Image: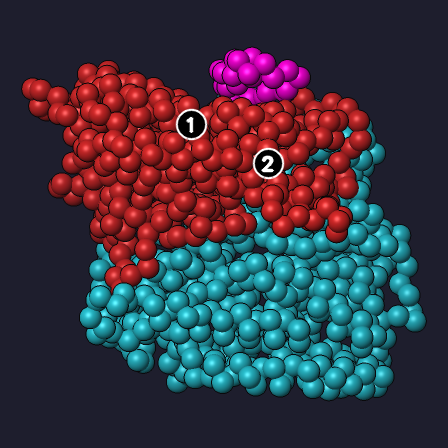
Chain colours: A red, B cyan
Amino acid sequence: MLDCMPEGPVEHTIGKINPAKTCQPIGAMYAALGIHNCLPHSHGSQGCCAYHRMHLARHFRDQVLASSSSFTEGASVFGGAANLKTAIRNIFEIYNPEIIAVHTTCLSETIGDDLPTIIKQSEIPEGKRVIHTNTPSYQGSHITGFSNMVRSMISYLAEATEPVKKEQVNILPGFVNPGDMREIKRILQEFGIPGIMLPDTTNVLDAPLTNRYSLYPEGGTTIAQIADTGNSKQTIALGSWASDAAGAMLLDKCKVPCVPLRTPIGLKATDDLIMTLHEKFSCEVPGSLAVERGQVVDTLIDTHFHYQGKKVVIFGDPDIVIPLTEFVLTMGMIPKYVLTGTPGARFETEIKHMLGEYQVEGSIVKAEGDLFQLHQWIKEEPVDLLIGTTYGKYIARAEDIPLVRVGFPILDRAVHPLMPIVGYRGCLRLIEMISNTLLDRRDRDVSDEDYELVM
Amino acid sequence: MAINHEVLDKILLPYPDKVKKNRIKHIVRKNPEEGCQQIEANTRTIPGIISQRGCCYAGCKGVVVGPIKDMITITHGPVGCGYYSWGTRRNKARADENTPPEQIYGAMCFITDMQEPDIVFGGEKKLAKMIDEVVEIFHPRAINICATCPIGLIGDDLGAVAKAASERHKIQVLSYNCEGYKGVSQSAGHHIANNMLLEHVIGTGDAKSEPEKYVINILGEYNIGGDSWEIERILHDIGYTIQGVLTGDSSYEEIKNIHIANLNLVMCHRSINYIAEMMEEKYGTPWLKVNFIGVEATKKSLRDLAQVTGDETFIRKTEEVIAREDSVVLPVLEQYRKICAGKIAFAFVGGSRSHHYQHLLRDLGMEVVVAGYEFAHRDDYEGRQVIPTIKLDADTKNIPELDIKPDPERYQEAHVHLNLSKEKYDEICSRIPLGYYEGMYPDMKSGNLMIDDCNHYEAEILVKRLKPDLFFAGVRDKYIAQKMGIPAKQLHSYDYSGPYAGFTGAMNFARDVAHAMTTPAWRLITPPWEKETKEPGDNNA
């Protein structure tokens, strides 16, 4: 496997070899799928839309519907206004969504299509909405695209209409699975705090198979709910790469204060979410959550010898990797290499700060990196475990290191989008995955006389 | 339920007039009394329609040149296009006597990852530097550079970058201007890739033809799920030598020398017919359309091929191999026929599969009642005899047609390639359609539908009306069909199974299809607390 990999240091300063990120539009498409009755629309050539639908369908194993402006060479020369206007007309007539969420592509961005003007000139049936966001693929990553789309939802749709803010919380969950969003909503329910999640892909990309088919699944944040985010008394933005921009927009546009937090992966980040809800809404922390937390601590102590001291690689999206690194530190593991493909120097600062707190030295932390670099580091000094996306499987095989699949995308395993890694329950799931993976490896590798019944 | 005009009208009814006018030409209900029915294909998708189609880049990089295992393909553009086409088409490849494992790059992804300044100031320098680094790190035999949408707009001169890099590194660096917006689908990209390989790679090797061997190429076979390996197993057993497979498990080294073949076999007509035709013009190499999907289709293709050789040994050996394989395969298929017989299917895939798989399904007693291609041309539906009548529109004209002249040294008449006398060759041609593809139409039953570039809306209505037992499409449509209660199999990636070609493939396919329809969960959709008023799988009443 990967026999072509060079031995020893090489000069790789330009471009990406085995990238650890993808382009903005897919993030915008994923976010838009979390609006109820919404058809995401890709303003570019139809390959972008085809690729994004394919990739999302592979990760979620669920239907992903989106349309395209289907640019041809003519549109690329003369601009895509006519294509978008035709598309908007056809979409409302044929697919009848409540709202179309348009995102751009590197093609329409390079041409410089002026989307607000084109949308203004389009025929939009009464009561229907068209929103847009700019997602130039040559900046940021898929996380940037997600962030841009959520911010646009706020800027187009959120309204502060009530004189007094409502006792409800806006949760901006970031680019996480529907299973995670479901778990965060459950935590709110345990508290009894009314909330609006934006976007919300539960019942969209983890939709059940029933006797009813609908082009638009039951889930998704409704337009009314998005409007009402402007009336909430508090926003919690989870994951700063994906959610801070929308949180800031809500503050700016509707004067809803925002607490930016890490994605609640791991004990500490979940504690922060619980404490924020407790403080901002003056609610007692429900006993059920206290039990869950106690179970996590109990399990950590019971199982620490399965993983403590092991060297681990963590790679993926920054909002996942940062709290995950914190959690493996909590577990007593050593994050040896921590990498994201998404740009942002803050990633390195935050991780290095955590490593410093736990007195871990000799680690490499990199934003805007790629998996080729990561593989080179591993060849230089190996690790015990990889935690990251499916793309890590080549390194895992080449170097014979086990891989725990976490993040986006996971293309070669199922069920993961339905199972949370957030909250205290998510902690238990992560501990189970990490611990079992290491134990399975030990069982595989040991000699007969060292093969144990109890571990 | 039969597909009648009422059903067709219902499909088209809610369409806006312009869309209706367009789509009606892409839908043909077979009626032999109407003579040769024309279908519109390879024309623009209407903006806003949820199409299955991809882009030119996907056809060029994703389909044709990406799988060449010993070439490094650098995608020049922002990160997405290269990322999505990384490892997702299941083109299996392995080391062999021509290619050591350290020169296989299939699991790798190379992208210039253009940033805003590159879009503003141009990306040529970045590309050139990346080529330099990649050569230094990996020492590939040759490099492909594939353009993405912005490249054509900002005017990066890929040809010039490639030429300079080629001179610097003394290896071939090929550039493909396969910007996603070109043409109307993947099809344009196939053509661009075909042109480049024919013009710059094929025939550049110095291998000499080997008179003691019967050498064939398999064109348009991408070794998805190991299909090519199964086809090669059968052909080797009969005694043929395979020089190149384009482009499944193929190497640059092999492709350089495919001109030495006696004959080209064409699997996927749509993606590779250009090379078949151009090799015929340049070298005189004849080609035979084959279909190794389905037991009966495989047997017919093998027999046609044996007949074309005009060699009694091949004819005899072919029958021996067929008898040997039949004895294994037919009893297995018979078991699955019990599950599959009488069932109906839809098939919406690529440029040949929707036709090829009809044969395999027929082996299992199933019928495809609605079929269509994503990106085919009229000849893939109606047969190659319509090619001269196809009007070239602006989108097609943008893809250059090469002016191919016979190679002064290597051109030989077709019968010479085949080691046949002119008379024998003519006699064989009267029986076996060399250089011809009849398209899907003759294999469709009267009353059934052909739909070009079928979209989500049309598929949904047809599923509701006809309630097929199986839905064959890509991953984008698989889960839609399943949410409607219809078992669906991906025919691009075989749901990660395979091979599906040849004899072994037929058994794999039969098993997978039977499992898809019989998996017990289909009977569990209605929970016990909901009154059972519906038949299992009957989700759409």
Location of residue B63 in the rendering, given as x and y in whole percent from the top left corner = 60, 52
Residue drawn 80% across and 71% down?
Answer: B236
Picture quadrant where residue A221 is located: top left
Q: Nearer the viewer, residue A129 or B183?
A: A129
Residue A388 shows in this picture: no
Residue drawn 63% across and 30% down?
Answer: A310
In the image, what residue type sits under mark 2? His
Marks 2/1 in contact by CB < 8 Å: the verdict is: no
Residue B475 shows in this picture: yes
Compared with residue B350, is residue A288 higher up or lower down, i.e. above or below? Answer: above
Q: Which residue is mark 1?
A: A267
Q: Residue furthest left?
A: A163
Q: Which residue is mark 2?
A: A306
- Is A351 magenta? The answer is yes
Image quarter where the C terminus of chain A lies is top right
Q: Report the side of B495 relative to A419 (left or right).
A: right
Residue drawn 13% across and 25% down?
Answer: A166
Location of residue B435 in the rendering, given as x and y in whole percent from the top left corner = 67, 71
Q: Which residues are magenta?
A: A343-370
Q: Report the side of B99 relative to A120 (left or right).
A: right
Chain letter of the residue beneath label 2 in the structure image: A
